[in-house]
Image (cartoon, rainbow, N blue to C red):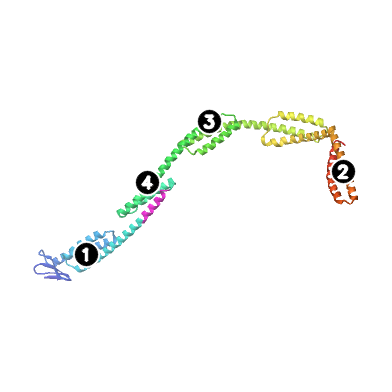
Amino acid sequence: MSSDPWGRVDETGTVYVRTADGEQVVGSWQAGSPEEALAYFERKYEGLVVEIGLLEKRVKTTDLSAKDAQTAIDHIREQVDAHHVVGDLDALRIRLDKLVETVGKRREERKQQRAKQSDEARHAKEALVTEAEELAQSDQWRAAGERLRALVDTWKGLPRLDRKSDDELWHRFSHARSAFSKRRKAHFAQLDAQREEARKTKERLVADAESLSGSTDWGPTAARYRELMAEWKAAGRAQREHEDDLWNRFRGAQDIFFAARSSVFAERDAEQGENLKLKEELAEEAEKLLPIGDLKATRAAFRSINERWEAIGHVPRDARPKVEGRMHAVERAIQEAEETEWRRTNPEARARAEGLTGQLQAAVDKLKGQIEQARAQGNNARADKLERELEGRQALLDQALKGLQEFGG
């Protein structure tokens, strides 16, 4: 008979292994010596040790699922419980029990981790849905559309929830995208209609502008072009493929008209500039007539100057008031001289002035006598009243005497 600390072989070749529950039959050995039998079954035991070690390492260092780990443990435990090996089977059972405990902890950790990930995914998807529903009401069509596409990509990268929750959130998310797409489609359909209406309006404006491009009725046509431009701006934009072409035609028609007008105005401005020089020379010639000596000669000279003035065409508008003002000043001086001369040489006017002066002088003398009489009688109130009346008559008399002097009297 042969034995070691964990097993023995009896006389019949039966191999036993020692356990905490007593000896267990390992098997029968007839092919060789008892030592060889024990060595054989000890090698099988070492194989289990290696297998357990590898499983421990896989559980610790890999993502081996709890289910697969438990299956592997059960498989080894069956071999241990079958006790077809020689060695410390109780130690193996202890290691397997610890391994079961480790797998259980890992299972719980992963369960908690999955729960946490699921909760995070739920919050993330709820946030995506909330943002999508806000974007569904946006009028920032390009930015909101790009953001919604980005949200879809983010959604695809998140873990699925339970079917009911995931489907409910996806339904809201999808509905928000559909609502936005529907609103955007309606907006651009309306925009297309508006742009088509703008195109028709601008086609008409272009036709009007082109029909006016050859006009030489400068003022009214320029005003009409301003009206057309206001209508153009109010019409809104046409489709992109039409807008630039319509604008080039519209602007080109205006350019033809305004270029022609500018050419004519340039010639007119040059002519008016020459006219201004001539009128400034005549104004200077007229100003030399002052002060007036011989009224008749001055009047004749001014008439000659004025005839030449009238023969000259227009001057620039901004220069007109100044140069015309110089001529008007000379004309007023001549008119004032004529009025003075008329008053001086008019017999009827002189007679009327002399008669008025005589009447006023008589009234003044009469009032003076009445005042002296009232003072002598002690009637000062009447005297004061008469003196106030005298002041008014005296002022009229002084004015009449001044007018009489103008007649040379």
Residue 210's mark? 3
Residue 124 appears at what percent x and percent y? 37, 55
Nearer to us: label 4 or label 3: 4
Q: Amino acid at mark 3?
A: Glu
Of pointers 1 and 3, the one earlier in the residue sequence: 1
Q: Amino acid at mark 1?
A: Val
Nearer to us: label 1 or label 3: 3
Residue 110 appears at what percent x and percent y? 30, 60
Q: CA distance from mark 1 to mark 3?
A: 102 Å
Secondary element at image label 4: helix
Q: Are marks 4 and 2 in contact (CB under 8 Å)?
A: no
Residue 178's mark? 4
Q: CA distance from mark 4 to mark 3?
A: 47 Å
Q: Which residue is mark 2?
A: 364
Q: Which residue is mark 1?
A: 49
Nearer to us: label 4 or label 2: 2
Q: CA distance from mark 1 to mark 4?
A: 62 Å
Q: Is residue 258 above or below residue 174?
A: above
Mark 1 surroundings: few (<14), some (14-19) or many (≥20) residues within 10 A? some
Q: Are marks 1 and 4 in contact (CB under 8 Å)?
A: no
Magenta span contains residue 133 = yes
Q: CA distance from mark 1 to mark 2?
A: 159 Å
Q: Are marks 1 and 2 in contact (CB under 8 Å)?
A: no
Nearer to us: label 1 or label 4: 4
Of pointers 4 and 2, the one earlier in the residue sequence: 4
Residue 258 appears at what percent x and percent y? 58, 33
Q: Nearer the viewer, residue 321 or 44?
A: 321
Q: Is residue 290 above or below residue 70?
A: above
Of pointers 1 and 4, the one earlier in the residue sequence: 1
> Which quadrant is the N terminus positioned in?
bottom left
